Image (cartoon, helix red, strand yellow):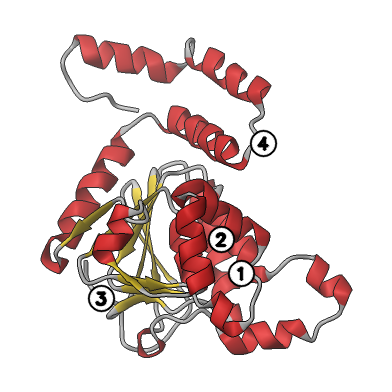
Amino acid sequence: MPEAAETATTPLLEIDGARATIRLNRPKHLNRLQPDDLDALLRLFDRIESAAAIRVLVLTGTGRAFSAGYDLNSITERATSTVEEQSAGSAFEIVVNRLEDLGVPTICRLNGGVYGGATDLALACDFRIGVDTSEMFMPAARLGLHYYTSGIRRYVSRLGADNARKLFLTAQKIGAAEMLRIGYLTSMVPAEALDEEVDRLAAILAGNAPVAMRGMKRAINEFARGELDEAAADQRARDSMRGAEIKEGIKAFAEKRPPRF
């Protein structure tokens, strides 16, 4: 995957057929996120959701790290805001939750280290493919920061309570092998194989039935949060049995060819 220009910018979007790629692009600062980046990400997510041709999103970073998380100066500035402003929810939390709820399947291409809030940004993706030199670090306990609730819930639901305790309460750095062992990484590859593995998974996801995947992704996320809308999930399942996707899927299976959704 070609690297972006050295000049720091808000996240970049590239669309190639059914695949969209968002690249964090502040390499000199390990892609540390600024308030402008959060606004840009929300706009890009809206653009992706509105484009029916996009079937999969890849999120990655420029340079030697995925991201160093959210700018700490912005966190301290926000801490001086009024109670009313804080109750509206942090901008970073809104971005991460929006990413988790995107209808298209998402892959985080972890090209290097992932730190602080960026660990949750990556965790909000459906899949995380990382290089074998990756590392992660959640420093909240060292900073005196009580992490936002939805982020802790995501850690617990996706990694388990014991792993969440280890990462949050010890604030210790772990390497790629441990990230794979606890389920943070979906797969771990050498740097030279990263693009091949991401491309392989992106092609699989882009070729599957988009409406069925969107509905099942929603149900999985709701199950994980303990807030499943069972009636809505059941209705989606019934609708799929008489929809265009299943007709094409069955026809393709009978004709021994890939489906065309």
The numbered mark, 3 or 4, whose residue comes first in the sequence reads 3
Q: Please give left or right for residue 236 compared with residue 27 in the image.
A: right
Q: Residue at x 67, y 20 (%)?
A: 231
Residue 5 placement: quadrant: bottom left
Name the front one of labels 4 and 2: 4
Question: Distance of mark 1 from mark 3, alpha carbons?
Answer: 25 Å
Q: Residue at x 82, y 66 (%)?
A: 87
Question: Distance of mark 2 from mark 1, alpha carbons?
Answer: 6 Å
Q: Which mark is residue 96?
A: 2
Which amino acid, by three-letter code, is at mark 2? Val
Q: Residues within 10 Å of mark 2 (few under 14, many from 20)?
A: many
Residue 124 in sight: no
Q: Which mark is residue 227?
A: 4
- The secondary element bearing badge 3 is classed as loop
**Residue 55 in the image, given as x and y percentages of width and height:** 39, 43
Q: Which mark is residue 3?
A: 3
Name the front one of labels 3 and 4: 4
Which amino acid, by three-letter code, is at mark 1? Phe
Q: Please give left or right for residue 207 compared with residue 211 in the image.
A: left
User: Could you tell me if the residues under marks 3 and 4 are in contact, i.e. CB atoms within 8 Å?
Assistant: no
Which amino acid, by three-letter code, is at mark 4? Glu
Q: Which mark is residue 92?
A: 1
User: Could you tell me if the residues under marks 2 and 1 are in contact, i.e. CB atoms within 8 Å?
Assistant: yes
**Residue 151 in the image, given as x and y percentages of width and height:** 58, 60
Pick the front one: 99 or 36: 99
- The secondary element bearing badge 1 is classed as helix
